[in-house]
Image (cartoon, coloured by chain):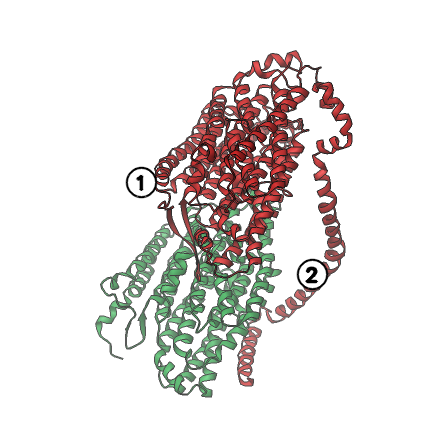
Chain colours: A red, B green
Amino acid sequence: MNYPIWLIPALPLLGFLLNGLASLLYGAAQAQKRGEEWRKAHPDEGHGHDHGSHEAAHGAHDSHDAHGHDHGHHDTGPMLPWALRLFHGVVGVGTVGLATVLSFGILVPYAKSVMSNVEGARPIVETLYHWIQVGGLSIDIAFRIDALSALMLSFVTFVGTLIHLYSVGYMQAEAGYGRFFAYLNLFMFSMLMLVLANNLPMLFIGWEGVGLCSYLLIGYYYDKDFAAAAGKKAFVTNRVGDFGMVLGIFGILALFGTTDFSFVDMARQQQMASGTPLGVYAVCALLFLGACGKSAQVPLYVWLPDAMAGPTPVSALIHAATMVTAGVYLVARCSAVFLLAPDALTLVAWVGAGTAILAASIGLAQNDIKKVLAYSTVSQLGYMFLACGVGAFAIGMFHVFTHAFFKACLFLGSGSVIHALHHEQDMRAMGGLAKKTPATHLTMLVSALAIAGIVPFAGFFSKDQILGSAFAGGHYILFAVGLVTAGMTAFYMFRLYRMTFSGTYRGTPEQESHIHESPLTMTVPLWILGAGSVLTGFLGLPEVFGKNLMVEFLSPSVGKMHAHEVSHATEYLLMAVSLAVAGAGIFLAFKWYTGQDAKFTPGAAPEDIIASPAAHAFFEKTGTLGKVVANKWNVDEGIEALVLSPFRKIGTFLWRGFDALFIDGLVNASAFMVELTGDLVRFFTTGNVRNYALTFVLGVLGFTLYIWMR
Amino acid sequence: MPFPVSDLILIVPELFLTAVALGLLIYATVVSREKEGAIAWMALAALVLTGVLLFVPFSSVTSLPQIGFAGMFAVDKFSLFFKILILAAAAVTILFSLRFIGSSPYPGGEYYCLILLTTVGMLFMVSGVHLVSIYIALELMALSQYVLAGYFKQETKSIEAAAKYFVLGAFSSGVLLYGLSLVYGAARTLTLTGVAQALAASPKAPLFILGIILVACGLFFKIASAPFHVWAPDVYEGAPTPIAAFFAVGPKLAAYAIFARIFYSGFGPGSADWTVIVAASAALTMVVGNVGALMQENVKRLLGYSSIGHAGYALMGFLGYGTDFGLPALMIYLASYALMTLGAFGLVVMLETKGYAGESVDDFNGLARKNPTAAAAMLVFLLSLTGIPPTVGFIGKYYLFTSAMKAGWFWLALLGVLMSAVSLFYYFRIVRAMYLVDGEGELRWKEEPAVSAAVIACLAGTLLFGILPQPLVSWAKACLLN
């Protein structure tokens, strides 16, 4: 297999160009048609009237009020003609699918060679050209495949293709179908650039590219305020992280004199160009700040739940399976550097654990099906950082891998539910869907078991080894936090399951008659991802069960902290404990959410409807705390009070006190100076040749005198 | 002065272009007014062929530089770098002129002939290694320029521009020639290498110093740097727009080339005094150019002042004398300047239908809505002129400012950055007009394939070298003076 690696990202880029162009051309043609119709309807109005007001009026007519639901037929216009839809679908799915085939054509032989000769496995590096050469710094456009990027590449392309396929069915009624696929293709291009980059600046290009696509797709329903605001929130929050990321890249350059990933080997051999322990710590902390922004860790996680305003396939692809794991990838990529700064690793571990338990607790009390999954994602990302923080980078990446399958499956399943219920996202208005949507039900059940950590589903193996690594490293508090989070995860996932699939349907009979299973383009990806949620775990069996293929595969690329070995007996005990905790969570969810309940009335507290008496008693006792948890620990309010409000005050001061008085004063003064200079210039630029000649002579004399005086 | 006939091969491109120019002049007398477009295309073809001829005589000769005509004319990589840029600028000018001249009341024959003759002058200039050959080439260029500036002879503005340009140009030639004669008096030779040797022997001779100052002032006039810039806004405003574009780029390229050659090869080694004058002029030029542009309503005048400002930045390249950063920085910058300036002027040409209509800032109102592609192209050129990545203007400025700092002129680099900020203000007045102001009535706009092609070429270069500067940088570094 000898084709260039660059083809892999180039294909989605081509898809983006084709889809975007077709979409633009069609849009322009439609706008012209509308304009002509409008002109026919208003023959008496002058031509001087510009198009803007007309289009604005048209837009206002089309857009309905926002419901807080992520998609609908009622959005921005009629469905596209079938031929155009076919084009967008074929180009969108086809380019990504082809990229996947190419990827596996490279990956499979590479993986074989790595597994047969772990020590001798060399990364494949393909340099296209030298991008920037300044002094000693050379930044190449170069692609790299090593164990780490191979792992990322495999699930990014595979899951990406499935989600593209799913979107064909899910988005078919959308007027923005072409735009959607264009952005989705652009996202794939950026993500592949991020994964395949051979140096940090190129990784950063992909990093910003996926951020841009995330923004564009969160705000896909741009005519709705909440979606536009959510996109902005994601973008701004990520800027905070990116500022750290950029400084971190500069730091790496300062430490190692290169931004090429060869710095990883230098770090492994402790060959630094310069740097103190504090410097290394600072660089790691800055890179981690970038990772926190992209991977939604405390305190920068607030954008991810809001990002659910985007269409569900976007939530599945970008905000669950791929983009948000880029931060973990970055930390794993720089693992050798982090190992030089143990304090930075401690920071990573604590932030990860804190995020895991905080997000899981919020997930306990959410009623929007996508919000539950969003907080679950934040929480699972926390687990991944916890793994990295205790030095088990390979295990963290393993969890990234398994999570991509079961979380994508959960999101697509929720999308299927939302699709079936005509855009209902409130779980209080669901119930009894198990029989009506059997494929969705079964695949979601499997992936819920996986995320809850029930043996032998994928999540069990990865999560259990994270907890095991924390325990083995002597981080007992982190271990305990992780264990409690595991219990919470099991509870909220099966709360979701019970509220959605068990019992009887809580909507009107009229709505009930419309419930339908999704089309094949949507269920096939669900089945495949469901199968992945069962099987992928076996790639990383714990040591007691045999060979851990995943850890062995990744060992040439990521660092590992030397950990104390724990006995097999302890390992079995840990597994039993984590299974017991997960089981308890599921048990409680089944006991409290019986599914035998009244009809849904909007605005009612959820527990009034579906929770059992025992649960009610518990909720009454927790009272205020429960409300605070349900309101996401008031974090948004806290940020408003502690960060935004002071900033607004500073801003007001700067505006009134500094800008209006000082800056404007300065500007006015300089404008006065400029005017004065202008007068002076005008005095000489009279348009009179004699004066021009005079300035010339003065110039010559001036320079001569200047030299003379020196 | 005797020279071997084989030396003629060195000036084959120049001879060819001269022959075509004269041939076209004769052809123009027999061709009808309607068919003058053919002259333009022939001139264009001649420029392209000349570009090819630049390389043909040396395909077998690997050893550049070649010097001929008793040490008066050199073909080296440095001159080839500038010749290619100059030929490209002339070609773009012709593309700009096709409709502009075709729809004007003035005949096209002499016009294209004069452009070619100006070009011949410039080609000889950049190859000159002898004070007299440089001066004569410069006069060939300048005389053709005066006529071109006044080509719209019914328009007062055009005539005024020509008259001013001629009087002041003659004045500056006088100063330059006086300077050259003083240098000759001191060095007793006119070849640059000879001057360099003589200067090394007696670096403090007053005749030399005065000569150097006068030569510098004469050349400052040609590149329109302060305080010898006063003619530029008037001439740019009055001259036909394609000619203004040509003046802003072609003659400046040639002037920078001979400045570099005279001062690096001739005056360089002996006396470092001239860097002080260059720095002073650079500082003054940046301030005058950028501040002067702030309040201009006429886009051509605005671009005229802006090109004065750019002359100030470019002068910083000379300060890097002796470091390995100065000359390549200047050359990279000039290439980038040519691309973005020609592009911006191209859009002004497109906006004009007849005479001087459509050249005020207000004429750009609402362009973004009526022709988003053109507005976007203008935006790129303006960003590039400001020096914002990922455009080639950023790369050019980056190298220039680095060069100034490496040579120890920190305050000058700082002033350059500050003045770039000022320039953003007036460039973005055009952007504001294009994007934020609604245009009234129909936009005067004529789509034209020739101008569009030229603008697209400039746009491609501006963006391509902005993102991938390495080829340009390597090319400039390979073409230094030796």
**B88, A140: nearer the viewer:** A140
Residue in the picture at 52% in, 58% down: B387
Secondary structure beneath label 2: helix
Which residue corresponds to mark 2? A667
Which residue corresponds to mark 1? A2
**Rendered location of residue A126, percent (x, y):** 37, 47
Image quarter hosting the N terminus of chain A: top left
* Relative to A618, residue A271 above or below: below
Q: Is residue A44 visible?
A: no
Image depth: mark 1 or mark 2 in front: 1
* Relative to A461, residue B11 above or below: below
Q: What's the distance in space between the residues labelled 1 and 2, CA to CA?
A: 62 Å
N-term-proximal mark, 1 vs 2: 1
**Rendered location of residue A629, percent (x, y):** 71, 33
Name the chain under label 2.
Answer: A
Secondary structure beneath label 1: loop
Mark 2 nearby-residue class (10 Å; few <14, some 14–19, many ≥20): some
**Side of B91 where A501 appears, left or right:** right
Q: Residue A104 is drawn in which quadrant?
A: top left
Residue in the picture at 59% in, 61% down: B293
* Relative to B39, residue A596 above or below: above
The answer to whether mark 1 and mark 2 are in CB contact below 8 A is no
**A129, B138: nearer the viewer:** A129
Q: Is residue B424 visible?
A: yes
**Rendered location of residue B222, percent (x, y):** 47, 70
Amino acid carrying label 2: it is: Val
Q: Residue A689 is drawn in which quadrant?
A: bottom right
**B75, A592: nearer the viewer:** A592
